[in-house]
Image (cartoon, rainbow, N blue to C red):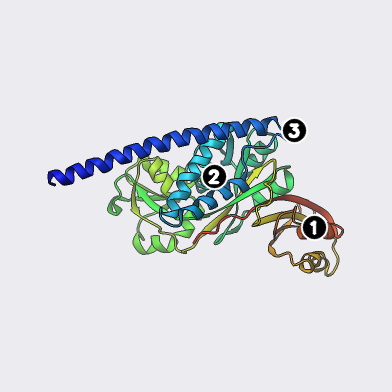
Amino acid sequence: MDDKQFQRLKSLRNRIDQIDQELVSLLQERMNMAVEIGKIKAKGSDRLQPLDVTREREVIQNILKHNKNHFPSDGLRVIFGEIISACRNAQRPAQVGYLGPETTFTHMAATKFFGNAPEFIPQTNITEVFEEVERGRRDFGVVPIENSVEGTVALSLDGMCDFKVKLCGEIYLPISHDLISQSGRIDRIRRILSHPHALAQCRVWLQRNLPAVPTEEVVSTAQAARWAAVDSSVAAIASPLAARTYNLQVVAKRIEDFAGNTTRFLVLGHECPRPSGNDKTSLLLSLEDRPGSLFKLLQPLAQREVNLTKIQSRPVKNEPWRYLFYVDIAGHIEDPKVREGVEAIRKGCTILKWLGSYPKGEMVG
């Protein structure tokens, strides 16, 4: 590098330093504005929550529109997601319970939705997440509701029936399994540990590449990673976050047998977001046992052109052959068509519980 090139490089780096200082000053100003907004929310008669999913989505969309693809869009989402998270937490620190332990896919989903600023508290099971939110010991909770390969999580359906919480968001997370160990070398693996579901989802890869290595089931992918961190002969099937957290090396990436494996998670809270224009409403209902009752019940939705996006049955505890139906429909409960449709089907229900309305989660490929 000649002197002219060196001086040019130095000049560019100095300018980057100046821009970074300007960015910090602007971030400080943004934080101050967020704190003032938090004070206004706290003083209002309805004491608004710091989390406003609809507003946060509007902010991200405005930023992406203004960017016009000059800066990588995925990078902007991450950067401004963390900025929003920090500013929201400055208004009022939040505690988020999730199905633990740390580094599970539910933990990853929670950080994807909330950013890294809140305090994330692992709970031992799904029922405990619902209970902690209902009793106000956690501001929010995150639980899995369905997987594109394994199907619906029954305990989450039960929790929505048994606890008084509101659904205020959803997250779609690609489930990618990595084989990780201390050395990162496949020839040093003597045992493979993971959650039963993870082992099942990677069965073909394991049989093809490590047919002689025994597998063992443990309670979570995170526990498997912890074992691998203290035993050099053990490899774990776990998330990329687990590898980073426990300082493990990747033996093989994305070893799941089915591409596109995705889990949908629900965000539990106490209040529902306002309409965003692209929302989903969830209901829990029970019908009288009569021929054609389900068809007649849902007919008012079709008449109002309200799209039914999901229906899932669940047996009622201690009442053989009676079922609850978990229903997702497109739109917000404040949309006239949705509100009228829900009121119309209420007449044919023995039970109808509005679980919540929230912006649709972004589907991932």
Task: Mark 2 or mark 1: name the one nearer the start of the chain.
Answer: 2
Question: Quarter of the image holding residue 122?
Answer: top right
At label 3, which amino acid type do we have?
Answer: Ser
As drawn, the residue found furthest toward the left would be 2
Residue found at x 76% / y 58%: 338
Residue annotated with mark 2: 110
Numbered label attached to residue 45: 3
Answer whether residue 302 is visible to the viewer in this image.
yes
Q: Residue at x 48, y 54 (%)?
A: 198
Q: Label 1 neighbourhood size at 10 Å, few (<14), some (14-19), many (20+)?
A: many
Mark seen at residue 193 = none
The x and y percentages for residue 347 are 87, 58
Alpha carbon separation for disc pair 2 and 1:
30 Å
CB contact under 8 Å: marks 3 and 1: no
Residue 35 lies, in percent from the top left, at 57, 31
Q: Which residue is mark 1?
A: 342
